[in-house]
Image (cartoon, rainbow, N blue to C red):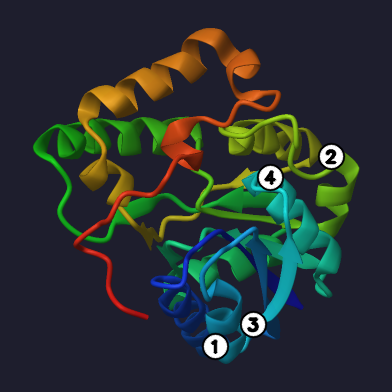
Amino acid sequence: MLSCIIPAHNEQTLIGMTLQALHDSARACGVDYELVVVDDASTDTTAETAARHGARVIKIEKRQIAAARNAGARAARGDLLLFVDADTWANPAAVAAVVEAFRNGAVGGGCLFQFDGPIPLWARGVYAIAIRVMRACRLVGGCFLFCTRDAFRAMGGFSEECFAAEEFYFRQGLCRQGRFEVPVPLVTTSGRKLRTHSGWEILTAILGLAWHGPKTNRGQKRPDLWYGVRRPDPHDAPE
């Protein structure tokens, strides 16, 4: 079984679309699957919306995406784990590529992404370069990751010392377990951070992580770009 694990905090606007995309994609591939939403300290109707869309809902109060993913993995019933962000939309080609990667012996991997709508000009330029570098270096973002349960257990899951960039360490751990694949199909993810934060805000957040390394994103200080109050995105669609 493919267990699709979706960590969510106050995602009532987008969670329905995310779950429907997973339903449609998994059914198109004919794969046995389940949807597990980890509602992490939401104050809106994320849990109720997820349940209406056929997900099993787990509630935690950690306010940390690594902890939410780990909680979802513990609750999952499948031997194959797919971690999808609540603002990311799968498609049949991507899910089929994940299933094929598992069949071919990969222990894990991730899909690269495109954005859901308009993003600033500077971001389009950065993305055009970054996506090529990521493909060449077999790097992925955290919005769509997959692994076997055995590999997940062997590496201890996501590091809960990290409040950001946890996917970097997760990828390192998977590469030590076996073959890490980056399938060709792209998934679609929200560009809301790029639309609602200035280039300077994003640059300083990323440079802080790059310069200071793990020390920046460990401990109790949560980076505002990922954990601050979410700013309204006019591109968000209703549930």
Residue wearing tag 2: 155
Q: Amino acid at mark 3?
A: Ala
Residue wearing tag 1: 53
Which residue is depicted at the point 85% across and 61% down?
74
Residue wearing tag 3: 55
The outermost residue toward the front is 43
Residue 66: which disc?
4
Which comes before the other along the chain, label 2 or label 1? 1
Instruction: Please tell me in which quadrant of the rendered image residue 69 appears.
Output: bottom right
Which comes before the other along the chain, label 4 or label 2? 4
Q: Amino acid at mark 1?
A: His
Question: Who is closer to the viewer here, 107 or 119?
Answer: 119
Which residue is depicted at the point 79% across and 45% down?
157
- Mark 3 vs mark 1, CA separation in Å: 6 Å
CB contact under 8 Å: marks 2 and 1 = no
- Mark 2 vs mark 1, CA separation in Å: 32 Å
Q: Amino acid at mark 4?
A: Ala
Q: Provide the secondary structure element on which disc 4 rests.
A: helix
Image-based side of 159 in relation to 166, left or right: right
Q: Amino acid at mark 2?
A: Met
Q: Can residue 107 be seen by looking at this rendering?
A: no
Which comes before the other along the chain, label 1 or label 4? 1
- Mark 3 vs mark 2, CA separation in Å: 27 Å
For the N terminus, which image quadrant?
bottom right
CB contact under 8 Å: marks 3 and 1 = yes
Q: Provide the secondary structure element on which disc 3 rests.
A: loop
- Mark 4 vs mark 2, CA separation in Å: 14 Å
Q: Provide the secondary structure element on which disc 1 rests.
A: loop
Instruction: Please tell me in which quadrant of the rendered image residue 26 appears.
Output: bottom right
Which residue is depicted at the point 38% across and 49% down?
230
Image-based side of 124 in relation to 112, left or right: left
